[in-house]
Every structure is written in C-alpha cells, then in structure tokens.
Amino acid sequence: MTGVRGWNRAALGCAALVLAATSVGCGSSSGGTASVAQTKSATSTVKASTATNPNAFGEISLTSTAFQNGHPLPATYTCSGANISPPLRWSKLPADAKELVFVALDIRKGGRNKVAWSFAGVKPSDAQIAAGTLPPGAVLGQNQTGKDKWGGVCGAKGERHRVAFLIYALRRKLNLKPGFDPIAIRPRLKAATISTGLTLASYTHP
C-alpha cells in the first residue's frame, strides 16, 4: 500500500529518535509542531525528558495496562496469540482538544515499518479503551494491508519489533469516514494537532 509506505518514511522521525536514545524526548504542544509526520521538525525540537516517562513524545500521557512503556508486548496482541488490539488509557489532554486520533507503527529492523492501526473520531471525554475495542463513535482507518482493523504484530521466528502507539489531540474535528487512509490525512492532522503522546512496546517472535 503506497500510502502506508509513505507514512513510514515520513512519520518515524520522532519514534526513531526516541528508540535510539530513551533518555531523550521530543515534541511540543504548540502549533502542531510535534506532529510525528515531520521528521526534520521533530529532530529540531528535541528536549529533556521527564522522569515519569523517559520516552515522552509531547505532553499527553499514554499508557497501557498490558505493558509498561518500553517493555515487551504480550503475545495476545500479536499474530502469535489472539491478535487483538491492546488496552490503552490517556490523560493530560489540552483543555481545547476537540478530537483524538491514534496511530500504531510497527517499527522493524532495516526500515521495514508498517502502520498496524489507525483510528479517529475519539471524544476528549474518553480516557481509555479495553483490549479489542474502540470508544463509541470512533472510526477505524486503514492498516498496512489496507484493511480497517488492528493489523497486529506479525513476522518470522526471532524477528524483533518495536511498536509505537501515538495519540494526537486536535483543535478541530476532522470528521473522517471509516476506512480513511492515514497517509491522506497527514496534512490535515498536522495542521490540527495541538498536543501528542507516545508509548512504546517491544516484541520478538518466538
């Protein structure tokens, strides 16, 4: 899928920076400059991390009850298990947020990266999702296969992955339709983003 490959090339600047040095965070909550779609901008806005989240990307706290930030993703959420989306919870949203958008990137050695998940239309009043669910009213976008679902973490025996779960708080609603192409919305996402968050997981296929 050409669009997803384009997202990979453009979107991984900040996530790659975090993975390379966990003592460094990146991002800003002002003017959408923290968009993960801007590699050059992300590199230029490196700042000291916080003690509570050494992999901080932006101001939003994004966590999971299934894994700790930077630690392994349980097999349940991969092709080695039930392959369902993991639970997520978030806080510290900007008061003027109108919508939340989520993207999960499967980051592999050698640049073989994929969009595993994308969804939008999440109300700022929502604070969490259970495994295998979405908030009421949320719409799924395409994953690396062009399907509207959690794409999972799949690969060969011994293959190592990093999965970056990203949240974007927007100043205005995008009103996206089910099956939206995550690459096609990048300009609108960048223009509307006022704050971001990131949590990371790792996985090695048995």
Image: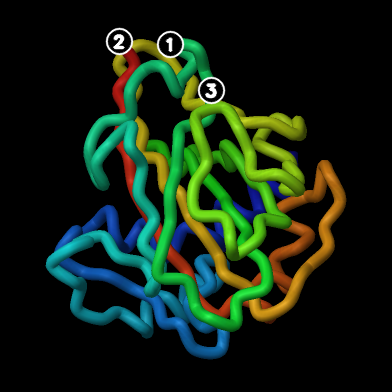
Q: Position of residue 69 (x, y in %)?
A: 26, 47
Q: For mark 2, does the 10 Å Cα neighbourhood hold few (<14), some (14 to 19), or many (20 or more) residues?
A: few
In screen coordinates, is 147 left or right of 72?
right
Residue 198 falls in image quadrant: bottom left
Q: Secondary structure at mark 1?
A: loop
Q: Determine which of the numbered discs, if any, sits on residue 206 in the image.
A: 2
State whether residue 164 appears in this view.
yes
Residue at 33% across / 23% down in the picture? 74
In screen coordinates, is 184 left or right of 193?
right
Q: Position of residue 95 (x, y in %)?
A: 53, 81
Q: Amino acid at mark 3?
A: Ile
Q: Are marks 3 and 1 in contact (CB under 8 Å)?
A: no
- Please name whichever residue, 129 or 195, is drawn nearer the observer in this view of the structure: 129
Q: Are marks 3 and 2 in contact (CB under 8 Å)?
A: no
Can you tell which of label 3 and label 2 is closer to the viewer? 3
Q: Which residue lies under the disc numbered 3?
A: 84
Residue at 43% across / 42% down in the picture? 107
Q: Which residue lies under the disc numbered 1?
A: 80
